[in-house]
Structure formats: C-alpha cells, structure tokens
Amino acid sequence: MPKYKSDHVLDDPDSVPRPVMAIGADIVTGAEAFKMGAHHHRKSQLIHTARGMLTCEVSQGLWIVPPGCALWIPGGARHSVSGVGNVEVYALFVDPDSAPDLPKACCTMSVSPLLREVLLRCAEFPTLYPVRGREARLASVLLDELAAAPVEKLHLPMPSDGRLRKIADAMAAEPSDRASVHEWAKRIGVSERTLSRLVVHEMGMSFGRWRQQLHISLALQWLSQSASVQSIATDLGYESASSFVFMFRKVLGTSPARYMTQRLEGSPTAASKDPG
C-alpha cells in the first residue's frame, strides 16, 4: 500500500482551488504488483517516479515511466497505474485553465533537476497554500519547467482488435519469439498483407516497429530491477548483448546503462552527447 508523504492526499484534487497540487508516496510491494484501477480527473496529472518504475495504461496504450521520467495525462483521460518493487512516486495535479499550453495528449517526459526539486518542494505545501508569495511563485516555476520538459519515446500502443491483442499478449509473454509477420499471420488465420494493414491501422506503426517498442518497454522494466544487459538481450531473443544495445541506442539515443544513469541523475539532454 502507498505510504503518503503528506496529509492532503485525502483531498479531492479536482476540488482544490489552486493551480497545482502535488503529493508524494512510497510504494513497497512484494511479488504482487501495486495497481490502481481505471479512473480519471478533471485536472491534468503528472506522474513522476523518483525511484522504481510504473506502467500506466491510457487510451489503449501502455506508457512506461522509468526512474527520472514522468507521464503527462491530460484532464479527463481514463488511466490505470501499476508497479512492482519499491517505488517513490510524485503526482502533480494541474488546473487546465492555469496551464493552457501544456500537452493535450499523453506523453512521457524527461524530468530536469530543477523540475524534480521544485516538484518535491511543492509536495510539501499545505493544500490551500497562499495564492501570493513563495509557494505561488514556485508553482509558477513548476509549470514553466513542465512546459519545457523534453518528450520521451516510451509509448507502447495496444490494439483493440481481438486478433492483434492475441499477438500482443503472446509477444509480451514470450518476447524472445522472433516469428516473422508471415508466421504471425498464419497463427491468427489471416494473410500477411491483412495483418500488416491491421497493425498500421490499430497502432500507427509497422509490425517491426511495434515489436521494437515492446522490447524497449520490457527492457526498461528489467533495467529498473537491476537486470544485466546480457540477460535482457537473451530474454528478448537477441543474438548478442551488442545487437540489443544497438537497437536500444537507435531508439532512445544512448546505451541502456547510460540511459538509466542519466534519468537517475536528472540529465536527459545528455543522451544526444553519447559518443557511441
């Protein structure tokens, strides 16, 4: 169960007359994952993981929130949240009228050191903090930093079509299965062309790109649990650790180890400086 860092978690965020409301919690789970069922808020929400990793399902998609990243959820979007292990999480609720320039769609964001520290400080505010003064100024800085946060490529679209969902579930259960599009088409009883068109229509990307995104999602989960690059490469069906690292760097711009280090240190822009 979550152990909250402040008392105002008991307040309904939608009823709090302030531009922002932040709360923090430590979540410790055993073998069973923590899960918060589908719900929504009038206010937009930012979910930031300071330690551990969360997975959120929003609008037929899975969104990965590794350490040092955050998920932006626009107001009104139904979402569920799950995680396993020890997770330190902060939730920020933003009144849409106070920040009209923030994203209108879900996205995973990098969290700069300044954004992280201001968010943590705002989580210490009383529910009805003064509308003028230090707290209000920090809330304004928080919104400015949030608007400037870089977007990450950590979205995994999930299909609504039953045939594609069978493939998605099978690939998630056995990610080392390297079956081709032709082989998957035979398994669900359609032509290769039909399957390819279905995937593009449902998920907005090719079959190969979707499988790559699935592998990135699984890799980030395992990296956050201190799995080795070699074991991850093996579990995902890569011939070698170097081929897995090549794929990871191609998608996220840096190696797995450096990616996790950068997120924990709050320096996401360093990815573009990775020499290889």
Image (cartoon, rainbow, N blue to C red):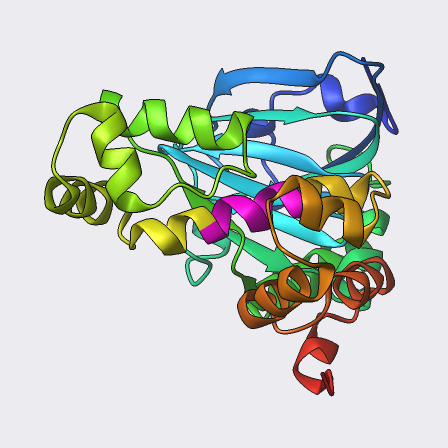
Question: Does 122 sit left or right of 213 as displayed?
Answer: right
* Vertical order, 152 against 184 (above or below): below
| Quadrant assignment for the C terminus | bottom right
Residue 246 coordinates in the image, percent (x, y):
62, 69
Question: Does 48 sit left or right of 217 as displayed?
Answer: right
Using the image as rendered, state which of residue 248 and residue 34 is in the foreground: 248
Residue at x 44% of width, y 24% of height? 169
Count all numbered tags in the image, as a single digit.
Answer: 0
Question: Magenta stretch mostly in which secondary structure?
Answer: helix
Residue 215 coordinates in the image, percent (x, y):
56, 47
* Vertical order, 20 against 84 (above or below): below
In magenta stretch: residue 218: yes
| Quadrant assignment for the N terminus | top right
Residue at x 74% of width, y 87% of height? 275
Question: Does 262 sit left or right of 59 as displayed?
Answer: right
Residue 254 occupies quadrant = bottom right
Q: Which residues are drawn in magenta?
A: 212-220
Residue 160 seen in this snapshot: no
* Vertical order, 14 against 1 (above or below): below
Residue 21 coordinates in the image, percent (x, y):
67, 39
Residue 138 occupies quadrant = bottom right
In magenta stretch: residue 185: no
Residue at x 32% of width, y 49% of height? 207
Residue 147 occupies quadrant = bottom right
Using the image as rendered, state which of residue 164 and residue 36 is in the foreground: 164
